[in-house]
Amino acid sequence: MKKGLLVTAWLLIAAMPVLACTSCGCSGGGTTLGMQLVTVRNYAGMIWQHTGLTVYEQGELHSSFASDTWQVYGSLQLPGKWHMQARLPLVWNRVTDHSPEGDQTENLFAAGDLNLMAGYQAMTLRSGRATHTLFVQAGAELPTGKYKADFVQAGLPPGFYPGSASIDPLAGIQYILSDSAWTAMFGASVKYSLPNADHLQEGLFWQAQTVVARSLGASGRWVPFAGLVAEHRNGYRKYDFLNEESAYSVAHGMAGMEYRGDRFSVGARFDHTIWQQYSTEETTNNGAYSVYVNWFF
């Protein structure tokens, strides 16, 4: 694979299922868990998400990346104000080199790293019709996913393999403002990757998001939502060498709709890139779309 994709596909592979908003389920590298999870603690669910990235060279299609992720997740209420969450992704990654001689594609279907998070409801304050809630979270990604150290020799992006082969600490915070019909969420999350046995260290990843949702009708079963997501990843490091070209920054506008049943919810979401910064200006983030289902117990 050529350099244009090598230094830019880091976004859609390595950053995808890092941290989702674990209280209301908004974006974590674009991953939705659903707006109803603001108030429902015990649940299990599954989400499918498609993402894409295209690299051009002098206006001609050069290379492309596509990823489909199936993620299972769940949350369990613990004594007091604590809860524990877990998620495990299954990823299908494709990297294609486009040339006059024909396209060449590398495929990978493998499991990613297991994400475990503990959350604490640090504040609940009622003021008139409004409720203010603050959650804090901490956890780690465990090295359960597929990883190979020879991705550079194979001409693949550094995050082509969904595993990191390292234990990566995670932290997050969410503030939620809600009343009977409206919900607004403001959150931030960060992932710090430790060096693995091959001395590869993924760059620091952070994300900030805001989401607004409204329950429609007397039953409140239909819930449209929209928001903004911003994220940044530093370049990865190999020994003392810092690959600054693998760094990126991106901002998404997103919108979706959810239907809430008594014991389940289903929804869909679309993310559109509104700003991006890569090492090459001829890189296009194609956004993302996803569908999900949650079961409550």
Image (spheres, rainbow, N blue to C red):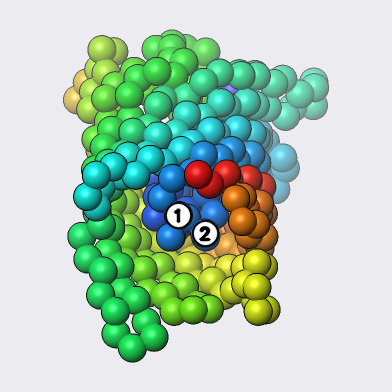
* Residue type, mark 1 in image: Val
Q: Is residue 101 above or below residue 293?
A: above
Depth check, front residue: 78 or 132: 78
Residue 85 coordinates in the image, percent (x, y) = 37, 39
Residue 41 coordinates in the image, percent (x, y) = 41, 50
Image side of residue 273 versus residue 117, left or right? right
The residue sitting at 40% across, 26% down in the picture is 114
Image side of residue 277 versus residue 58, left or right? left
Depth check, front residue: 176 or 190: 176
Please identify the residue farthest to the bottom as the structure is shown.
128
Q: Label 2: state its secondary structure.
A: helix
Depth check, front residue: 65 or 278: 65
* Quarter-of-image position of residue 199: top left
Residue 103 coordinates in the image, percent (x, y) = 76, 24
Dot 1 alpha-carbon crowd within 10 angstroms: few under 14, some 14 to 19, many 20 or more: some
Residue 71 coordinates in the image, percent (x, y) = 55, 34
The residue sitting at 39% across, 86% down in the picture is 129
* Residue type, mark 2 in image: Gln
* Quarter-of-image position of residue 47: top right
Quadrant occupied by the N terminus: top right
The residue sitting at 35% across, 20% down in the picture is 143
Residue underneath mark 1? 40
Q: Nearer the viewer, mark 1 or mark 2?
A: 1
The residue sitting at 22% across, 66% down in the picture is 123
- Assess whether mark 2 and mark 1 are in contact (beta carbons under 8 angstroms): yes
Q: Is residue 37 above or below residue 145?
A: below
Dot 2 alpha-carbon crowd within 10 angstroms: few under 14, some 14 to 19, many 20 or more: many
Q: Is residue 128 above or below residue 216?
A: below
Image side of residue 113 versus residue 44, left or right? left
Q: Label 1: state its secondary structure.
A: loop
Residue underneath mark 2? 36
Mark pair 1, 2: CA separation: 7 Å
